[in-house]
């Protein structure tokens, strides 16, 4: 049988009865004879454990759920660039993978994103726990993908028609803003430095950095909160790309706030999320400064979404209900933070930054309500309104313009993103030494414009089991004494351009690898090892850029073993200059011969027991 909203309450009662009786819940769902490229395998007679039963009951009770289909997933298929998508009703769709960009990589996680005419596929795998989260848009019909844990996933047919209750802070009390109650960080790493800020120029190498928090209820109802945040980021960036919005957003932090949203109005929650000095979720301001987040988004279990339309750092906060992310509400709210408004039926002001609905009800853009299409309802598509944008409507096989001079959310973004990207500026030389412990279902990224360093003789930065994260910089990443990536975490250190310092192949990410198909972390720590700091200091490369050979000079602060390897831009090992050879304390040098190599960017990785430094080398002819 199909499980749909009309029988949801009955199914809930049945599950509750069996769970209380201590029995294993058994669910019979529609089984399709066709497989999803041998990836989505629809199943029946599923025996659910207590945790799976809980998450499935939550999905059944969500007001946006229409139908559900259980499946298991072959994660190996995500290595392919093509997916054939067969739905349970026999419909078939095809998707080709987009090239991976920096905003599609989250530490060791990499999204599978494919977009073609009438098709959008966003899939976020979590390999360690065999969880899959994502979103599908297939000829105007939306599906969300959620994990029930332990290898069992669910495809959810989604519909939010008539459920939108988005507000702006014009309708709620304004909070106490940062300028009224100064933010005083308790973590010394969160102190701002006016002389260590990168010059921000919005271009292909500069991202708007977004922090995501989630409430107690959102955490209780989602198996993979980090995967959900990654899906939201991917949907937003695809919407920008579809529409000609000249920006990308980058996820820099996902964390549990410990805040309960139960029984509260979304306007109240937004006020408490962004206010300072009220003792409620004030840690967001420390987190924002540490991770240099331009915007802060809270995922909740209430309302649909709300945000301010005032383009200031103090107001760059938003709220989105977890169930509405597949309806594009996450970047709808971020659009408000860029001064974008709803369509004229929902907003009567004078702004030209308004959403658009097709007059015959064919579609509506991200910022528009269903009423934008007149008396009937219409599907929201992942496009922002604009006079130069077109949306292909499959039933009529026609491209339709998505806006005009007064319905132009694209202009709202493009005219304000230069302000938004400067809300928080990353440091030229990031150097942290504070105490950190990132736990299960948390993601944390740190970035420096040129360099990023962590080292402390008294504190530790710990990525604990179940956490995820990354540290990146333009030229070098140094992880010294006090840094730990524990067993069970997914962590990656890598080089990528941030705003203006260097350009690596047009702004794509370089992840250093071990020379085979499996990416290796740039730092590898063992819990049983003594974490001593064999430091690499005073590194000089000359000449750089070079045409044939380059000399790499470095100093060790004590005797010990060092390895020096050269990787090409794609992470392939080119040569080993020093192979774990013991060195005396003091200055040393080695020569890299690139005379027979093609011109381009290379990376020198220097590794001691607990210290890694990566230097960018430019070979030119």
Image: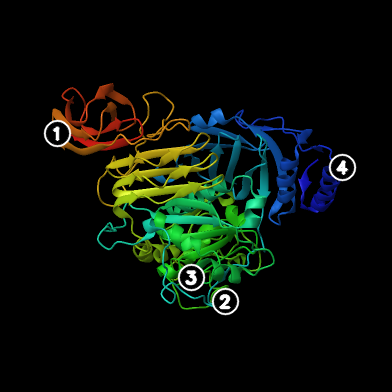
Asked if residue 291 shows in the view, the reply is yes
The residue singled out by tag 3 in the image is 276
- Report the side of 106 relative to 578 (left or right): right
Sequence-wise, the earlier of marks 2 and 3 is: 2
Which of 478/576 is in front? 478
**Residue 112, image x and y in percent?**
50, 38
Check disc 3 and report its element: helix, strand or loop. loop
Q: Residues within 10 Å of mark 4 (few under 14, many from 20)?
A: few
- Report the side of 52 relative to 146 (left or right): right
Q: Residues within 10 Å of mark 3 (few under 14, many from 20)?
A: many
**Residue 116, image x and y in percent?**
49, 42
Q: Residues within 10 Å of mark 1 (few under 14, many from 20)?
A: some
Which of 431/408 is in front? 431
Alpha carbon separation for disc pair 3 and 1? 51 Å
Alpha carbon separation for disc pair 4 and 1? 73 Å
**Residue 22, image x and y in percent?**
84, 40
Alpha carbon separation for disc pair 4 and 2? 46 Å
Asked if residue 100 shows in the view, the reply is no
Eye-nearest disc, 2 or 3: 3
Instruction: Assess whether mark 2 and mark 4 are in contact (beta carbons under 8 angstroms).
Output: no
Alpha carbon separation for disc pair 1 and 2? 60 Å
The residue singled out by tag 2 in the image is 172
Q: How many marks?
A: 4
Quadrant occupied by the C terminus: top left
The disc at residue 546 is 1
**Relative vertical location of residue 343 with respect to residue 153 in this rendering, above or below:** below
**Relative vertical location of residue 331 with respect to residue 594 in this rendering, above or below:** below
The residue singled out by tag 4 in the image is 21
Which of 587/50 is in front? 587
- Report the side of 432 relative to 348 (left or right): left
Sequence-wise, the earlier of marks 4 and 3 is: 4
């Amino acid at each position: 049988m199909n499980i749909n909203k009309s029988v949801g309450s009955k199914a809930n009662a049945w599950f509750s009865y069996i769970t209380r009786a201590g029995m294993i819940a058994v669910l019979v769902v529609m089984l399709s004879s066709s497989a999803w490229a041998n990836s989505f395998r629809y199943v029946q007679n599923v025996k659910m454990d207590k945790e799976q039963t809980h998450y499935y009951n939550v999905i059944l009770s969500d007001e946006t759920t229409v139908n559900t289909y259980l499946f298991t997933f072959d994660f190996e298929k995500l290595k392919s660039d093509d997916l054939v998508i067969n739905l349970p009703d026999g419909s078939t769709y095809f998707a080709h993978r987009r090239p991976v960009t920096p905003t599609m990589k989250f530490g060791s996680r990499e999204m599978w994103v494919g977009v073609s005419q009438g098709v959008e596929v966003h899939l976020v795998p979590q390999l360690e726990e065999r969880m899959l989260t994502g979103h599908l848009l297939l000829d105007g019909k939306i599906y969300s993908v959620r994990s029930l844990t332990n290898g069992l996933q669910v495809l959810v047919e989604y519909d939010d028609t008539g459920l939108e209750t988005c507000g702006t802070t014009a309708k709620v009390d304004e909070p106490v803003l940062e300028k009224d109650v100064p933010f005083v960080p308790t973590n010394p790493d969160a102190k701002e430095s006016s002389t260590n800020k990168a010059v921000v120029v919005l271009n292909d190498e500069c991202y708007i950095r977004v922090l995501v928090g989630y409430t107690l209820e959102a955490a209780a109802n989602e198996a993979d909160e980090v995967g959900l945040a990654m899906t939201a980021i991917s949907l937003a960036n695809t919407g920008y790309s579809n529409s000609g919005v000249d920006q990308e957003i980058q996820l820099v932090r996902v964390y549990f706030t410990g805040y309960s949203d139960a029984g509260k109005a979304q306007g109240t929650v937004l006020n408490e999320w962004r206010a300072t000095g009220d003792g409620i979720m004030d840690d967001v301001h420390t987190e924002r400064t540490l991770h240099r987040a331009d915007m802060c988004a809270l995922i909740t279990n209430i309302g649909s979404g709300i945000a301010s339309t005032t383009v200031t750092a103090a107001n760059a906060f938003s709220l989105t209900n977890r169930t509405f992310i597949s309806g594009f509400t996450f970047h709808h709210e971020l659009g408000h933070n860029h001064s974008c408004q709803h369509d004229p039926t929902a907003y009567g002001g004078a702004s030209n930054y308004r959403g658009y609905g097709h007059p015959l009800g064919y579609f509506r853009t991200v910022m528009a309500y269903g009423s934008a299409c007149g008396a009937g309802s219409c599907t929201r598509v992942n496009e922002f309104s604009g006079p130069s944008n077109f949306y292909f409507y499959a039933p009529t096989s026609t491209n339709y313009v998505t806006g005009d001079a007064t319905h132009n959310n694209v202009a709202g973004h493009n005219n304000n993103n230069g302000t938004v990207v400067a809300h928080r500026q990353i440091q030229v030389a990031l150097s942290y030494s504070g105490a950190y412990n990132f736990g299960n279902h948390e993601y944390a990224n740190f970035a420096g414009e040129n360099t990023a360093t962590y080292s402390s003789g008294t504190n530790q930065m710990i990525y604990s089991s179940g956490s995820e994260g990354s540290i990146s910089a333009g030229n070098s990443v140094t992880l010294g004494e006090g840094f730990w990536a524990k067993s069970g975490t997914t962590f990656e250190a890598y080089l990528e351009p941030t705003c203006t310092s260097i350009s690596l192949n047009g702004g794509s990410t370089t992840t250093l690898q071990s020379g085979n198909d499996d990416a290796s972390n740039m730092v590898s720590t063992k819990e049983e090892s003594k974490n001593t700091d064999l430091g690499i200091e005073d590194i000089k490369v000359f000449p750089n850029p070079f045409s044939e050979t380059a000399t790499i000079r470095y100093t060790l602060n004590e005797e010990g073993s060092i390895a020096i390897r050269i990787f090409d831009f794609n992470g392939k090992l080119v040569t080993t200059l020093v192979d774990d050879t013991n060195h005396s304390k003091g200055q040393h040098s080695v020569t890299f011969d690139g005379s027979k190599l093609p011109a381009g960017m290379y990376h020198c990785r220097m590794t001691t027991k607990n210290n890694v430094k990566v230097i960018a080398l430019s070979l030119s002819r």
